[in-house]
Amino acid sequence: MPEHTRLIGQMGVLFLVAAILLLLMDRQMLIGPEDLKQWPFALLSFVVMAGLFLVVAALVHARVSGLSRALGDLERQLTEANRELAVARDDFEQRVERRTFEISVANASLNREIAERIQAETETKRIKRRMELILESAGEGIFGLDIDGKVTFVNKAAALMLGWEQDDLVGQAHHALIHHTRAGGEPYPVSQCPIHQAYRDGKVHFGADEVFWKRDGASFPVEYISTPILENRRLTGAVVVFRDLTTFRQPLSPGEAS
């Protein structure tokens, strides 16, 4: 039951008791002995009402004191809750600031890494383009091989001399395609091929008095140099530079000999 309802009920009971007492006293004064009739009814009523006032005042004071104590407890709890909330808010703000700083640092590092990567890619493309221009402008045939002997790149001069398109040569096994047979017609084992040896033993190998075979089945005399490719001290392939010796081996005409 709520406190105010209980207080109203108690006061109602007290006033009802007081009213009954006054009624009984009034009847007693009317029918009682003569000596009791000497007391004025007003004085008795005053005494009863004064007692009633004191009782009501005591009840109200007790209730007000209880409410004050409860209000004080609530205020202390509210103060404690506010203090804990302030501590939690400060801690949260510190965590947010620290996390924001960490994110800012991470973003700055990421942006720097992206910028460096873009710069590196741009530089790589520039170098690659320069190498392509050098390869395309070279008069000798040049092609690269991986560790399995497959063509990784080929310049325009090499493709023209061999009768192939550049893209058709990439990915093909060079020995089986253009170096499979000796000039005399006997098979040329890949294990004896100086080009093959370059990306096996890591040494530079030269070739002369040999032939390369074109796409149409014709051959032409060449001399070449096969240079190994090393990446972090590890063999990853070879670069082959060759030239067609046909024009150098053509016999002189009688007019030119004289």
Image (tube, rainbow, N blue to C red):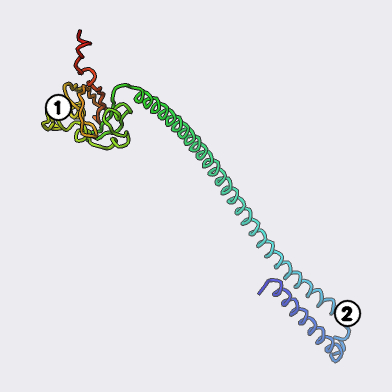
- Residue at the disc numbered 1: 183
Q: Amino acid at mark 1?
A: Ala
Quadrant housing residue 70? bottom right
* Depth order, front residue of 80/85: 85
* Depth order, front residue of 56/189: 189
Element on which disc 2 rests: helix
* Depth order, front residue of 46/201: 201
Element on which disc 1 rests: loop
Residue 112: % across, % down: 48, 32
* The C terminus, quarter of image: top left
Q: Is residue 123 above or below residue 30?
A: above
Crowd rating for badge 1 (residues with CA inside 10 Å; few <14, some 14–19, many 20+):
some
Describe residue 155's horizontal placement relative to residue 35 as left or right: left
Q: Amino acid at mark 2?
A: Ala
* The N terminus, quarter of image: bottom right
Describe residue 14's horizontal placement relative to residue 116 as left or right: right
Q: Nearer the viewer, mark 2 or mark 1?
A: 1
The residue that appears at 52% across and 40% down in the rendered structure is 98
The residue that appears at 56% across and 49% down in the rendered structure is 88
Which numbered disc flags the more N-terminal residue, 2 or 1?
2
- Residue at the disc numbered 2: 42
Describe residue 116's horizontal placement relative to residue 74 as left or right: left
Residue 246: % across, % down: 22, 21
Quadrant housing residue 54? bottom right
Residue 172: % across, % down: 25, 37
Query: In the displayed image of the protein, which residue is found farthest to the front?
Result: 255
Marks 2/1: CA–CA distance:
153 Å
